[in-house]
Image (cartoon, helix red, strand yellow):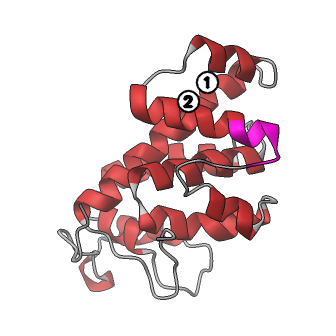
Amino acid sequence: MTIDTPRISPLPPDEREERTEALLATLRFDPDAPDMNLFATLARHPRLLKRWSAFGGLLLAGGTLPARDREVLILRTAANCGADYEWGHHLPIGAAAGLTQDEMADLATTLVATDHPLDALLVRAADELHEHSVLSDGTWAALAETYDEQQLIELCMVVGQYHLVGFTLNSLGIQREAGVEGLPR
């Protein structure tokens, strides 16, 4: 199900409290750019935005997983959730992390065909968490051959965090900004 119009609209700058505006300023990748619709919408609940953005920021910029691996998990989760907004915003991040356009497009397909063995394992992990809310023993054992305990915890948290984001984006009807791609159809 796709929501074509926002159920909750982004909070306009003239309706923001000073603390909320200051928080939003910290979430801008470009200080001169407008706020992303996700952040401006969540600004309607500033306490939640503050705590969630700290958690998400840790996973995105301060985590222990290699950036490429993290982006495989995020893009696959966006595809699993049908989260166009999340997908489009993570394409440039995935490219900066070393994923090719073809690799990223492949993550949106039902049967991912990859020559990168770790990508296939990460896709399997994201799919198992999406479908069953748990990693199978075989997937866990395979992941444990590559990742340490912190990374294994983080891997589960990344998939869970981006489910939260995908569910929120989809349910609130948060619209993509102009020029942001959606999932390939």
Range covered by the magenta-colored residues: 114-120
Is 32 in the magenta?
Answer: no
Q: Residue at x 36, y 71 (%)?
A: 40
Q: Residue at x 51, y 70 (%)?
A: 184
> What residue occupies the far left of the structure in this picture?
7
Q: Residue at x 48, y 30 (%)?
A: 129
Q: Quadrant of residue 66?
A: top right
Residue position marked by numbered label 1 in the rendering: 153
Q: Secondary structure at mark 2?
A: helix
Classify mark 2: residues with Cα within 10 Å, few (<14), some (14-19) or many (20+): some
Say which mark, if any, is on residue 156.
2
Q: Position of residue 71 (x, y in %)?
A: 66, 52
Viewport quadrant of the N terminus:
bottom left
Say which mark, if any, is on residue 69.
none
Q: Amino acid at mark 2?
A: Cys
Q: Secondary structure at mark 1?
A: helix
Name the side, left or right, on which 97 lies relative to 75.
right
Q: Is residue 133 above or below residue 74?
A: above
How many labels were placed on the picture? 2
Classify mark 1: residues with Cα within 10 Å, few (<14), some (14-19) or many (20+): few
Q: Position of residue 163 (x, y in %)?
A: 42, 44
Q: Residue at x 58, y 47 (%)?
A: 111
Mark 1 touching mark 2, by CB under 8 A?
Answer: yes
